[in-house]
Image (cartoon, rainbow, N blue to C red):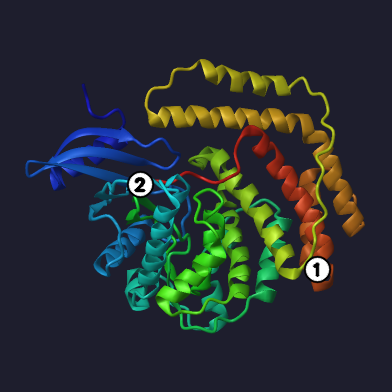
Amino acid sequence: MSLVTTHEDAIVVSWIERHVGEVRSVSRQGRWRPAWYVEATAKGEPVSLYVRGARGGRFPPLPLSYEAKVHRVFYEQGVKVPKLYGYIEELPAMVMERAPGRPNMATAESDAARERLRQQLADQMRKIHEVNPALIVAAGAPDPKDPHEVTLCHYRQAEQLYLSGDRAPSPDLEFVRGWIERNAPPCEKPPCVIAMDAGQFIFEGDEITAMLDFEFACVGDIHADFSALKTRDTFEAIGDLESFYRLYEERSGEHLDRRRIDFQNIPFMAYTPLEVAHELLYPDKTPDYYEYYRWHAYSVQAAVEDIARYTGLALAPYELPKPTRNRYAHLSSAIAASTLNVDAQGDFSQAMLEKIRMNAGYLAFREHFARVFEDEYIADVAALTGTTATSEWDADVVLEAFVHGAGPESDAAILQVLYRKARRMMAPIEGAGGRGIGVGWN
């Protein structure tokens, strides 16, 4: 039986057999991003490999070759990352050892094991923060000097993608961008190396076996890494974050400013919607449109909620309106139901089939609410701006213009409208069985 079924499989196998050894098996990982598990033999010994492909599209801001360089720097500086065998230019992809283990400390065998893992996570984060920033700059990272820009360095990369690409009218992102610009505190510490999307690792027993995922690593404000843990903790449990911050302080001697961590939540949550805005206009060119849309919706809602929390504003709860009966929703429901009768072979095919089911479920839910959602939004925008739009798209145009002309005195009113808008985006996703966060990669 052939080891390969696609052109990409063949490239992976060919590279590994030239540079590592004979390939015994290869399988595509069951996720949207191209990645492979490979079993090979090197010098007579079995070797398990993980091949991490590029996302595709216009992001992340720096290419996968940059992540490979950062990965190698971290390995050389003693961060517990998998051995890197090399880089496949043709795909592109990184080839590394496949470390044993699983993510999510919630699955650890005991509280004692979880505490041991938390201590190791603090130590590994400290090691990353102690890497000489010049090494990451030499790999291709920006080198911020102004204290305000140090605070926002990681965010600026996503913002530049947003500004340089095409995008739909985006009153929510335009408001968040303006708010961040007005309220970003200048960094009071020297810039350091940060993972940005921090806290990703796998473990066995009570030992971390590998730290993972450094495509967004850069030089910036240390507090950005600790804000990232808040999102990570929602689906890969880290435990009480305040006690983890104290643990890091004890083991590093570094004081963490809780208010700055709270601020950094906001550019962190804005990062993904900014970088995928262009892709969301071109579904035929987007590797996994529904995945990107879920990221967008979840992150926009979180950014709005974080601004409200940071400024002490209590957002009025949004109550889902009564749905309208819609015979066309049955078409999407039928597609979702039909996937239950398909026997998909392999992790990747099963994952893609599940994505089709979720996508169809989203559309079925959205059809029942489409009319009332649009009417509500048009009414919200009219009440705020005095202009009545004729469609949801036009209401976005009207609200974006209002956001650009408004001062800080309008923030509270705008946030209420944007929160209701965000809840309308998220409700069908939640109804279809997803919160907008992707799965781990190793």
In screen coordinates, is 137 left or right of 384? left
Q: Amino acid at mark 1?
A: Gly
Q: Is the residue 250 above or below the residue 51 in the image? A: below
Please give the residue where the numbered disc 1 appears in the rendered image: 405
In the structure shown, which secondary structural element does the residue marked by tag 1 occupy? helix
Please give the residue where the numbered disc 2 appears in the rendered image: 53
In screen coordinates, is 217 left or right of 68? right
The residue sitting at 36% across, 65% down in the picture is 124
- Assess disc 2: are there few (<14), some (14-19) or many (≥20) residues with their C-alpha within 10 Å of its C-alpha: many
Q: Amino acid at mark 2?
A: Gly
Q: Residue furthest left?
A: 44
- Assess disc 1: are there few (<14), some (14-19) or many (≥20) residues with their C-alpha within 10 Å of its C-alpha: few
Q: Is the residue 148 above or below the residue 324 in the image? A: below
The residue sitting at 89% across, 47% down in the picture is 379
In the structure shown, which secondary structural element does the residue marked by tag 2 occupy? strand
Q: Can residue 154 be spotted in the picture?
A: no
Q: Nearer the viewer, residue 171 or 188?
A: 188
- Residue 219, given in percent of the width and then of the height, sits at 44, 73
- Residue 383, given in percent of the width and then of the height, sits at 91, 54
- Comes first in the chain, label 1 or label 2: 2
Q: Is the residue 78 above or below the residue 396 in the image? A: below
- Residue 282, given in percent of the width and then of the height, sits at 57, 43
The residue sitting at 84% across, 67% down in the picture is 410
> In which quadrant of the rendered image does the N terminus lie?
top left
Q: Can residue 347 be spotted in the picture?
A: yes
In screen coordinates, is 121 left or right of 74? right
- Residue 70, given in percent of the width and then of the height, sits at 33, 64
Q: Nearer the viewer, residue 237 or 75?
A: 237
Q: Are marks 1 and 2 in contact (CB under 8 Å)?
A: no
Quarter of image, res 214: bottom left
Q: Which mark is residue 149?
A: none
